Image: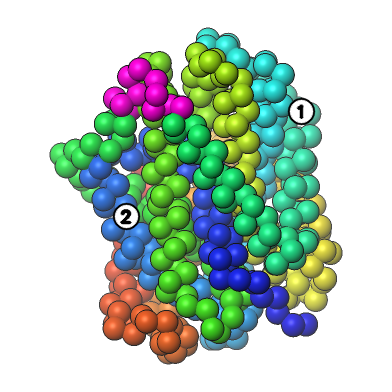
Amino acid sequence: MARSQWGSRLGFILAAAGSAIGLGAIWKFPYVAATNGGGAFLFIYLGICLTLGLALMLAEMALGRASKAGAVGAFRQLAGGGWPIIGYMSVLVCFLILSFYSVVGGWTIAYIVKALGGGIMTSDAKTLGAIFNGFISDPLEPIAYHAGFALLTVWVVAGGVQKGIENLSKFLMPALFVLMLVLIVRGLTLPGAWDGVKYFVAPDFSKVSSAMLVDALGLAFFSLSLGLGIMITYGSYVSKESNLLGSALWVILLTVATCFLAGLMVLPAVFAFGFDPSAGPGLTFITMPAVFAHLPLGQLFAVMFFCLLLLAALTSSVSLLEVVTSFAMDEFGLKRGQAAWVMTLGIFLLGIPASLSLGVWSEYQLFGMGVFDLLDYLTSKLLMPLGELLLALFVGWKAWPVVRRELAGDGAGRRMRLMRGFCMAMAPALIGWIMVASLRAA
């Protein structure tokens, strides 16, 4: 079966950037950056993205393009032996993440409906908290929206690389930026909004510490979708003529820009009305509706905000499903539509106990965690960083000749020695440090 290809370099860049721009960019990045030194954190985060992040992203794209295979097939073709276990781990992580990510994606659809109906247009945070907690603990409603989000995702992926993923990315990514800019402009016009901007961007180098560096490293690797097999899979659809270095730089810059714009979108409005900027996920579903309730045309802006969240969630979920769909196609010979629907069914079924664990099944726990929290912990604290670590070692010690040959014509030649050094030693050491620090903090 001939391997699909992107129709254009722009389509590839927007799809790859979309995979990295998810819900975490909206609520997690602004808070983490602001509480870790603001501009100092932003500078360090950008530096990590343009060094270690760029090296690992380029390596993944090169592995995909060289092998013309998905996460598992790439390791099998380029090395064999026990190395494909890294690919299997990537597919498993994408499957597990999407099972609970789809649940949260369903929440964004539900809140678009609630915003349209005006049911969340109140400035009382306690009332909004009760609405949110009552919704996620309901045994049926969140699962229905989880199904709706899963259907949106599989509809895109089943459409194919060009007609599905690429065409959607060309529409969703510009729409995402337009919505963010509209909300930023509105937020910056509020009295007291500039205090939020200062809180976000003013550098505080006294906050630079080992804990802050761990946060910056972890957020950089996570926000760039590294170690998930996504860039390998997307790279397998790239033509030999495409410049991987330029594409990777664009993906990183778009991702960093989106995270920065999210801070400008969220924090000024939150500060303008004296709300808590450290509310985490609650910032999305509790604090922001309270902010919109204070605004003229607040209902319109609330609908726009949750539409933006849906777009961000969908661009990420599509990339996660594409990894497991490509795996099923390559390994079992399924047609794209069959593979996408079979995998989506499994993901949806696993998402049901994840959703119920926030309500009627909350008393059923393993290792002190419900299904939702356990899936999040396994993927973000264990499997993702372990996959990144093994991938770096594979590139630096085993597959370097392939990567060097694949990137030789992309203008990266003089940087090759530095890139290999990152993969051989620096990246594994830093990722190992992140894992240890995260496990100690858990």
Quick check: 331 left or right of 399?
A: right
Q: How is the image coloured?
A: rainbow
Q: Position of residue 335 (x, y in %)?
A: 82, 71
| Residue 67 to residue 336: above or below | below
Quarter location, residue 166: bottom right
Disc 1 versus disc 2: distance between alpha carbons? 40 Å
- The amino acid at mark 1 is Glu
Q: Element type at marker 1?
A: helix
Quick check: 262 left or right of 234?
A: left
Which residue position is annotated with label 1?
141
- The amino acid at mark 2 is Leu
Q: Element type at marker 2?
A: helix
| Residue 402 to residue 13: above or below | below
For the magenta stretch, what is the residue range?
186-196
Can residue 154 be seen in the rendering of this structure? yes
Of the residues under marks 1 and 2, which one precedes in the sequence? 2
Q: Residue at x 38, y 71 (%)?
A: 55
> Which residue occupies the foreground of this view, 106 or 2?
2
Q: Residues within 10 Å of mark 1 (few under 14, many from 20)?
A: some
> Which residue occupies the foreground of this view, 154 or 343?
154
